[in-house]
Amino acid sequence: MTIIVRDDGFHAEDYDGAVTEIAPDTAPADLPQHYDDIGLIRVAFPSFADGRGFTLARLLRGRGYRGRLRAAGHVIADQYAMARRSGFDEVEIGEDLAARQPVEQWQARANWQDHHYRARLRA
């Protein structure tokens, strides 16, 4: 079973429509060009050390995708703020990761809009 992480904590899967899957090695030219029929895009993260998904999320948002955008796989709590800043709405993790990194660790990074280097420079 997977767990969906959002700013307010852990959730069960609540999306039942068609999902567009994007692999981390997808070339920018191969990203969807039209979003009318896409309710959720799921970008795979094969490893927490593989940040290509963050770039893909930024590109999708920059090209006008306004639907639900999910990072799925090996994303850790320390990366949650980066995932949100790059355009993801949520992160999908497995139960094993949720057990090692409980909801409190994810929620500690849920104030992602305030805690980034630009905010620290302005302070």
Image: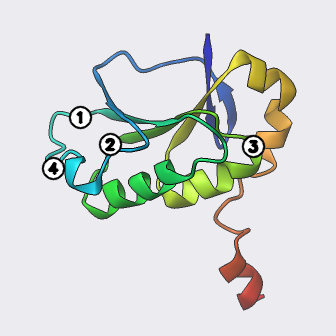
Q: Is residue 101 left or right of residue 89?
A: right
Q: CA distance from mark 3 to mark 4?
A: 31 Å
Lower position in the chain sequence, tag 3 or tag 4? 4
**Which circle's residue, 3 or 2, is located before the other in the chain?**
2
- Name the residue beneath numbered marker 2: 67
In this view, the residue in front, 108 or 34, is 34
Question: From what the image shows, is residue 42 above or below residue 34?
Answer: above
Left or right of 63, for residue 99:
right
Residue 106 as seen in the image, left or right of residue 17: right
Task: Give the vertical position of 15 relative to 107 (above or below).
Answer: above
Circle on res. 33 = 4
Q: Badge 1 is on which residue?
A: 38
Q: Position of residue 51 (x, y in %)?
A: 56, 52
Quadrant of the image containing the C terminus: bottom right
User: Element at badge 2?
Assistant: loop
> Which residue corresponds to mark 3?
77
Whether the residues at callouts 1 and 3 have beta carbons within 8 Å, the answer is: no
Looking at the image, tell me whether mark 4 or mark 2 is earlier in sequence order.
4
Q: Residue at x 21, y 55 (%)?
A: 29
**Residue at mark 3 to residue at mark 2: CA–CA distance:** 23 Å
- Element assignment for label 3: helix
Question: Pointer 1 and pointer 2: residues touching (CB < 8 Å)?
Answer: yes
CA neighbours of label 4 inside 10 A, class few (<14), some (14 to 19), many (20+): few
Q: How are the colours assigned in the image?
A: rainbow
Q: Residues within 10 Å of mark 2 (few under 14, many from 20)?
A: some
Quarter of the N terminus within the rendering = top right
Q: Give the mark nearest the N terminus, 1 or 3.
A: 1
Q: Position of residue 105 (x, y in %)?
A: 83, 41
